[in-house]
Each structure stands twice: as C-alpha cells, then as structure tokens.
Image: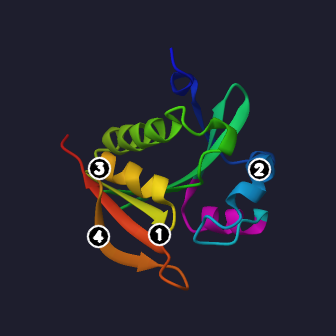
Amino acid sequence: MTPAQYLEFKKSESDQEIKDIFNFNAKAFAESQDFTWSEDNIKKEIKEGWKLYSVSYDDDIVAALFLKKDDGTLLTKNTPIKLIYQGNGFSHKIKDFYEKVAKENSMKRIVNYCPSDNFRMISLNEGHDYTKTGKTFGPHDEILEWEKHLKN
C-alpha cells in the first residue's frame, strides 16, 4: 500500500485542533492562502461557514483543508502538502476526498480556489478535470477559481 492510502481526514472544531493545524507548519502556509495564515484568521474562516479539516499521515498533519457547502456546490481550498511528504500522492487523495464529500451530499459541482503561482496545484486541477472559471480573487487577483462538474 502507498502512504496516500493511510491518510486521515478529520474535521477540526475545537480550539486545540485549530491551534494544532496552525502550529504544525505555519511557515509553509504563510503565503499560500487568500488570507494571512494566523489562528485568528483561521477562526474567521470558520465563522464565515468554512469547515476546517486536518489531513494526517502517521499522526503528522500534512495539510489543512477548508470546505463550504453553497447551494449544491462544494467550495474547497487547501494548503500545500507539507514539503517532506510531497510526491506521495496525497494531493490526489485530497481531490478524491472532495469528490466523496460532494457525492455524499448530492452535490453536482466542486469549486477549488488555488493560488495563481502554485503550478503543482494548477497541474493537479487540470489532471482531475477541473476547468478555470475565469474568476479571480484576492487583493491582486492571485487566487484562481476552478470547477468540476460531477456525474452522480
């Protein structure tokens, strides 16, 4: 079995779980999001309806995910994979997790927000049949919106 098959996805709701996600490797994520990576801003995202998930391998948090349900669409964004774990197929498993959640909730569309300079994530989106919507976000339009329509 590959390491990606052992990933654990856990919804994070307590202050301690949020702190653990923030602290596990905050430096790796500081410039990769559409908001400044801080514990307060993570809590703000949660208050705005985003659900926070940790992605762990062998008890080590390797990424953080944000999911939000919006009128039949699953909105998604995630941090990059922790550097020492890149290349193990974890990003593909995250995309599979998004599809699983969307299908379990009878959603027909997934939207993913991705930094315009993250070529790995852009390539991953293309490889998983996501298409750019043409919409951009952020102070400098650095966040791209991608979508995938599901066949349930």
Q: Within 10 Å of the Cα at label 1, are there few (<14), some (14-19), or many (20+) other Cα atoms?
A: some
Q: Earlier in the sequence, mark 1 or mark 4?
A: 1
Task: Evaluate if marks 3 and 4 touch, with contact meaning CB atoms under 8 Å apart.
Answer: no
Q: Is residue 112 left or right of residue 21?
A: left
- In the image, residue 115 sits, relative to residue 98, either above or below, namely below
Check if residue 70 falls in the magenta segment: no
Q: Quadrant of residue 85?
A: top right
Q: CA distance from mark 2 to mark 3?
A: 32 Å
Q: CA distance from mark 4 to mark 2?
A: 31 Å
Q: Which residues are magenta?
A: 40-51
Residue under circle 3? 107
Q: Earlier in the sequence, mark 3 or mark 1?
A: 3
| Amino acid type assigned to the residue bearing label 1 in the image | Ser
Q: Which residue is painted at 46% across and 54% down in the image?
A: 121
Distance, label 1 to label 2, CA atoms, is: 22 Å
Task: Give the residue pinned by disc 2.
Answer: 25
Of the residues under marks 1 and 2, which one precedes in the sequence?
2
The number of discs equals 4
Label 3 or label 4, whichever comes before in sequence order: 3
Residue that label 4 marks: 133
**SS category of the residue bearing label 3:** loop
Q: Residues within 10 Å of mark 2 (few under 14, many from 20)?
A: some
Element under disc 1: loop
Res. 31 mark: none
